[in-house]
Image: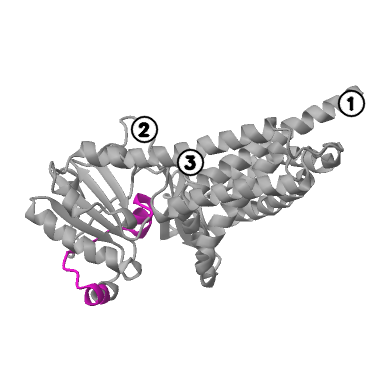
Amino acid sequence: MRKEKVLQALLIVSRFILGLVFIFSGFVKGVDPMGSAYKFSDYFNAFNLAFLDPLAIPLAFVLAAAEFLIGVSLIFRFRFQLAAWAVTVFMGFFTVLVLILALTNPVSDCGCFGDAIIMTNWQTFFKNIILLPFVFIVFFYRKDQAEPWSPFYSLGSLLVFGFLFLALEAQAYRHLPQMDFRPYSLGTHIPDKMTIPEGALQDEYQTLLYYEKDGKIQEFTEENFPWEDTAWTYVDSRHSLISKGYEPPIHDFTIADEYENDITNDILADEGFSFLLVTTHIGKADPEALIYADKLASWSVAKGHSFYCMSSSVEDEIIQAREDTNIGFEIYTTDEITLKTIIRSNPGLLLIKNGTIMGKWHYNDFPAIEEMDKGLTSFVMTGLRKDIEKRSLGIFIALFLIISAFLIYTPFGRNNSR
């Protein structure tokens, strides 16, 4: 009897640990599906599978929803035996995959927790190793856990959770993430995030020297190279990173003009309002949004504000976009990864003042010029966006808790045969 109680306790603990991890992992991906899509694209390119890139967005939606529903199933025991199989297959597949990624390191960040928790491939692998014992307990003792719900009720409940979660993902995809884990969130003072604190650890490199003697090349360090033996001939040297130092949250934010002059500091030091139009590839940007942005650029100049378009597009792409949309604003160069990190929209729009992000908009939500004519204030713009974020996230959390409480305490749908 005592053994059975211990096993039941272990099973409950394992269910909840795995369930919470999967819910959290699915949720942080679900509030930012474009982030997961970018990660899929990185892996496709790293493994020479670029032809699969059109599947990046659908896979991002499916992966987040699958993780979330597996977590819900484990905690509430909806089709529990099926959930046990799902978590076992899921963990088995991704543990092997992450081991391969850790050994080859094609992409440094696995993206298992989105941008909420950045983990290396090795950290993710060891995280999975820690979770595997709980997976084994759930799988091998899955038949010892009674199904509390009828199959019909379990399926219906999962469909409700799934519909609610897909609505959350669609909202984030068509607008902006409800929770912004990146270093370019509203209210961020960009220069602060670019600063290395005094006394912070610096990158440590080792210099390797290559000398040749009697037709053989040998590797030395600065401490043991044969400086006294003139028979050795210097061949080459290289620097190897042996210890990573402090890296500021924003370390690759640069804006260059057509002559490759860095104008980043000038923009960040501007005490007036500046609009930053962000487009990774202008040829793939929403054309109507570009046309509207051109009107916004003209309005900005007329009102004494600044307007900059940041893109990683090549010249031919820019020329074609100008011909297609008749846009006239200047286009400045910024790294593609930086642009994808700044905002999940192509194009997207930022409003900054003295280096502080005052507003962020998806192209579906670009602010109306008529509204801005009433007064371009940080209070209105920041408050509007934060209110939208809080309402979207608040509605999701409230519905999740209400449905969860209902499912736990309602007598309907319970499997009376247990």
In this figure, which residue is indicated by the disc labeled 1?
3
What colouring method underlies this structural image?
Answer: one colour
The location of residue 144, given as percent across then percent down, is 86, 37
Using residue 117 as the reference point, say whether residue 151 is left or right of it.
Answer: right
Using residue 300 as the reference point, say whether residue 161 is left or right of it.
Answer: right
Q: Residue furthest front?
A: 412
- Residue 217 visible here: no
Tell me where the magenta segment starts and ends, as one range: 320-344
Measuring 51% from the left and 36% from the top, which residue is drawn there?
397
Q: Quadrant of the N terminus?
A: top right
Q: Quadrant of the C terminus?
A: top right
Dot 2: element = loop
At label 2, counting other C-alpha atoms closer than 10 Å, the crowd grade (few under 14, some 14-19, many 20 or more) is: few
Dot 1: element = helix
Decide which of 413, 313 is in the foreground and name it: 413
Measuring 22% from the left and 73% from the top, which residue is drawn there?
322
Q: Tally the numbered discs.
A: 3
Eyeballing the image, is 403 above or below 258? above
In this figure, which residue is indicated by the disc labeled 3?
116
Residue 200's tag is 2
Badges 2 and 1: C-beta atoms under 8 Å apart?
A: no
